[in-house]
Image (spheres, helix red, strand yellow):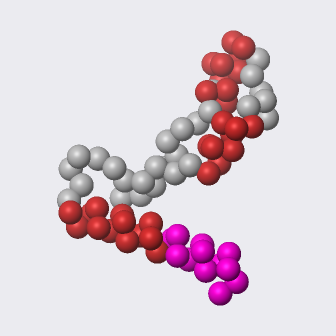
Amino acid sequence: MGVNVHYIPVTWQPYYQERFGFRRGEFPHAEDYYRRALTIPLYPTLSDAQVTWVIDTVNNVVERVAAVGSGV
């Protein structure tokens, strides 16, 4: 299991850049979301143990980031 990028801004797709002339930087909110978003494992066949692992892992990362941010 792993994480993945779920949403790539449409304006970064080659078709839309060629067809409409979109360039990076023109839609900062979409690009900011793209830089911060993460898709965690999520599908119907996840076992209870896998769900627990995902939850524990996300909580661990959040705790570590909070500790670094607070200077601990």
- Percent of width and height locating residue 51: 28, 62
**In-image side of 61 versus 43 (left or right):** right
Q: In the picture shown, does residue 49 fall above or below 20? A: below
Q: Please identify the quadrant where the C terminus is shown.
A: bottom right
Query: Does residue 5 appear in this view?
Result: yes
Q: Please identify the quadrant where the N terminus is shown.
A: bottom left
What span is colored magenta in the figure?
A: 61-72
- 63 and 25: which one is in front? 63
Give yes or no for residue 69 being in the magenta stretch: yes
**In-image side of 69 versus 26 (left or right):** left
- 2 and 35: which one is in front? 35
Give yes or no for residue 70 being in the magenta stretch: yes
Rendered residue at 44%/66% (across/down): 58
**In-image side of 19 versus 48 (left or right):** right
- Percent of width and height locating residue 41: 37, 53
Looking at the image, the residue that sits furthest to the front is 70
**In-image side of 24 versus 3 (left or right):** right
- 60 and 10: which one is in front? 60
Q: Number of callouts in the render? A: 0
Q: In the picture shown, does residue 43 fall above or below 13? A: below
Q: Main secondary structure of the magenta part?
A: helix
Rendered residue at 52%/76% (across/down): 63
Q: In the picture shown, does residue 66 fall above or below 2? A: below
- Percent of width and height locating residue 30: 66, 36
- 2 and 58: which one is in front? 58
Looking at the image, the residue that sits furthest to the bottom is 72
Rendered residue at 72%/14% (across/down): 20
